[in-house]
């Protein structure tokens, strides 16, 4: 059951479709209600970005998973802050802990080239396929280390495929998904299982 609650919360956040009954999972905040340390970190991490929306979550993020503390009251003190940001060449989301540490960031990079190692891998393993001009970049931060994934749309004729590469240009195990797509699939599975 706890897994279902976690997946539901992640999906709701990822798609921004939070209804009144789901408010237990998120609190919309104003800039004035945000901890100063979080705002300072956002300015440092995303200097040219504008914060579009401020939210707080009663969750703990462990690696790439989310743990909802369902019984934790939302009394204005939160463990995790979730911000929607917009920059010159990207739209994104960033998640911070209450100490201002960046936990994860997801950016839609518009007209930004892929890293050379990712482009080389695509050329080697997907000859004849063209790369979409925009791609999603998901980065997880933990203990001074980061894991980055590039979500790339590939096209060939009428075919289209989404492929995920790690920060070294290695294709992530085929069929393994991250971020929004993973949350969407898990939510659909949960609905089928319960429905």
Image: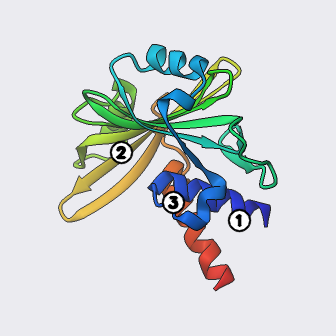
Q: Nearer the viewer, residue 59 or 172?
A: 59
Are the residues flagged by discs 2 and 3 in contact, CB closer than 8 Å?
no
26 sits to left or right of 135: right
User: Can you tell which of label 2 and label 3 is closer to the viewer?
Assistant: 3
What element does badge 3 sit on? Answer: loop
Residue neighbourhood size for the residue with mark 1, other residues' Cα within 10 Å, grouped as few (<14), some (14–19), many (≥20): some
Task: Tell me the distance, in whole angstroms, between the alpha carbons under discs 2 and 3.
Answer: 27 Å
Q: Earlier in the sequence, mark 2 or mark 3?
A: 3
Q: How many marks?
A: 3
Q: Residue under label 3, please give it.
A: 18
Q: Is residue 31 visible?
A: yes
Q: Which mark is residue 169?
A: none
Relative vertical location of residue 166 with respect to residue 141 in this rendering, above or below:
below
Q: Residue under label 1, please give it.
A: 4
Q: Residue under label 2, please give it.
A: 152
Q: Earlier in the sequence, mark 3 or mark 1?
A: 1
Residue neighbourhood size for the residue with mark 3, other residues' Cα within 10 Å, grouped as few (<14), some (14–19), many (≥20): some
């Amino acid at each position: 059951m706890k897994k279902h609650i976690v997946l539901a919360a992640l999906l709701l956040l990822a798609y921004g479709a939070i209804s009144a009954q789901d408010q237990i999972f998120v609190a919309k905040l104003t800039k004035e209600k945000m901890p100063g340390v979080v705002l300072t970190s956002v300015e440092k991490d995303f200097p040219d970005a504008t914060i579009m929306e401020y939210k707080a979550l009663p969750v703990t993020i462990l690696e790439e998973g989310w743990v909802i503390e369902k019984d934790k009251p939302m009394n204005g003190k939160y463990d995790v802050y979730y911000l929607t940001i917009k920059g010159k060449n990207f739209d994104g989301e960033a998640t911070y802990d209450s100490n201002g540490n960046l936990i994860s960031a997801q950016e839609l990079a518009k007209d930004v080239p892929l890293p050379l190692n990712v482009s080389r891998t695509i050329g080697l393993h997907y000859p004849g396929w063209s790369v979409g001009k925009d791609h999603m970049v998901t980065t997880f931060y933990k203990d001074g280390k980061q894991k980055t994934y590039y979500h790339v749309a590939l096209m060939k004729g009428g075919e289209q495929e989404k492929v995920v590469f790690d920060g070294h240009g290695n294709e992530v195990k085929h069929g393994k998904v991250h971020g929004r797509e993973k949350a969407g699939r898990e939510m659909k599975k949960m609905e089928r299982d319960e429905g």
